[in-house]
Amino acid sequence: EIVMTQSPDTLSVYPGERATLSCRASQSVSNNLAWYQQKPGQAPRLLIYGASTRATGIPARFSGSGSGTEFTLTISSLQSEDFAVYYCQQYDDWPPITFGQGTRLEIK
Amino acid sequence: EVQVVESGGGLVQPGGSLRLSCSASGFSVSIKYMSWVRQAPGRGLEWVSLIYSGGRTYYADSVKGRFTISRHTSKNTLYLQLNSLRPEDTAVYYCARVHDYGCAFDLWGQGTVVTVSS
């Protein structure tokens, strides 16, 4: 099973600043990596797939990068609606499909 | 509108059973890969099961032999049969559609709550 580890667990950032979230895989997942945003009481929303391709309707301030075992989600200028929990997910070698434990992005 | 709507959750005793439903609109569940993902209270996301358009099924080890994924083409509905339920199965269960390019999940329902407790 591929273990996904996200860092940090909690990130505090001022609105308007850049946020950088990390995700590490226990073995290479090539570019088969997705990012999701989840707000309290809501379902997750797909942001990025293929490590760097924005899903339909996702604003350009969200960008993904990386390949192999190291990945990054960058939010270039944080808006109030961006404060949420973010999950990475690998779909390279499955079952099982595995998620990271999540990073909580909070307002500083 | 393209959406999926889950139902069927509830309170059940340990060892009991439930059947979750996921009604799809705007697309056909029979030509898409579909999946179930759960989230225990205050915890992260856990993949549960996936069904290919061709019918092949996959399960997480934690539910293998107890849960069964299936679909009904004419009702355009995905199901998850939950048997031999345990307290650790308590979670919000989400139905999710698999993206056309790799097994990311591009459409999620609002979830249905399953509580396993005596």
Image: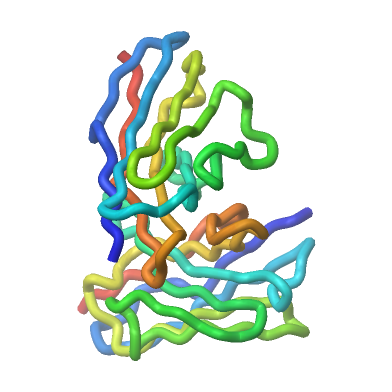
Position of B25 with respect to A84 (left or right) is right
- Which residue is located at x 61 percent, y 37 percent? A54
Position of A53 with respect to A8 (left or right) is right
Residue B109 lies, in percent from the top left, at 57, 58
Residue A101 lies, in percent from the top left, at 28, 47
Residue A8 lies, in percent from the top left, at 24, 31
Q: How many marks?
A: 0
Towards the viewer: B33 or B72: B33
Q: How is the image coloured?
A: rainbow
- Which residue is located at x 74 percent, y 56 percent? B2
- Which residue is located at x 26 percent, y 46 percent? A5
Position of B118 with respect to B113 (left or right) is left
**In this rendering, is residue A20 above or below A43?**
above
Dividing the image into 4 quarters, which one contains the C terminus of chain B? bottom left
**In this rendering, is residue B6 above or below B14?**
above
Q: Quadrant of residue A69?
A: top left
Towards the viewer: A19 or A23: A23
Dividing the image into 4 quarters, which one contains the N terminus of chain B? bottom right
- Which residue is located at x 63 percent, y 33 percent? A58
Residue A67 lies, in percent from the top left, at 43, 42
